[in-house]
Amino acid sequence: MQINRTTDYALRILIYLGQENRIVSSSEIANGMRISQRYLFSIAKKLKKRGYIKVRFGPDGGYSIAKPLHTVSLYDILILMEGTITVSRCLTQENHCEDKPCVLHDAYSFLQDIIECYTQNLTIDMLVGKPVDTWHKAIINNLDEVRRQHQESGKSLSQ
């Protein structure tokens, strides 16, 4: 799984706005990220539509944060921009596995749960100028819970 460039920029826009904590012009953001304003507008449109950012028009206009960043997770933005973060088609509703379930299903399921747990617990607020050790331990504890649940369900997973 690779996060596409547009998703990466969406996350960086939110982090930048969170760090600035003011209305920031589109040209400042675009120049700072070395992207065209047209590209910025297309990303910002999605973020605005979902209510993550606000737009102010006029000479003093620009973008600002609309929601408290502690309520916006990495998962929220990944789903908004990517549509899905499913690691394998084996895990989708269509169930693409020839064998029911396939030999990799449990491994993919565990990996999916880890990715979802991590991204759901990592908020944009945590990424705004905070050292990794301030939020990493809490997320690791949640991952340990995911592993415990998989072990209790009888699935074979290594430590």
Image (spheres, rainbow, N blue to C red):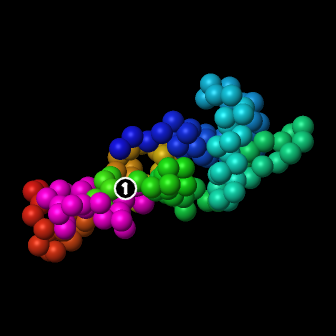
Bounds of the magenta segment: 92-120
Q: Position of residue 8 (x, y in %)?
A: 51, 39
Query: From what the image shows, is residue 138 above or below residue 42?
Result: below
Q: Position of residue 73 (x, y in %)?
A: 49, 57
Q: Is residue 102 visible?
A: yes
- Residue to which mark 1 is pinned: 86
Question: How dense is the environment of label 1, judged by Cα within 10 Å: few (below 14), some, or many (20 and up)?
Answer: some
Amino acid at dot 1: Thr
Q: Residue furthest right?
A: 59
Q: Residue furthest front?
A: 98
Query: From what the image shows, is residue 17 above or below residue 138?
Result: above
At horizontal 50% and vertical 50% (from top left) the residue drawn is 82
Identify the image quadrant of the C terminus: bottom left
Q: Position of residue 19 (x, y in %)?
A: 61, 42
At horizontal 77% and vertical 36% (from top left) the residue drawn is 25
At horizontal 78% and vertical 42% (from top left) the residue drawn is 62
The answer to which of 13 and 48 lies nearer the viewer is: 48
The answer to which of 62 and 44 lies nearer the viewer is: 44
Query: From what the image shows, is residue 36 above or below residue 72?
Result: above
Identify the image quadrant of the N terminus: top left
User: Does 149 sit left or right of 33 as displayed?
Assistant: left
At horizontal 48% and vertical 46% (from top left) the residue drawn is 127
Residue 57 within the segment the image draws in magenta: no
Q: Quadrant of residue 30?
A: top right
Q: Position of residue 67 (x, y in %)?
A: 64, 59
The answer to which of 89 and 126 lies nearer the viewer is: 89
Query: From what the image shows, is residue 22 above or below residue 147?
Result: above
Secondary structure state at the residue bearing disc 1: loop
User: Does 108 sit left or right of 72 as displayed?
Assistant: left
User: Does 133 sit left or right of 110 as displayed?
Assistant: right
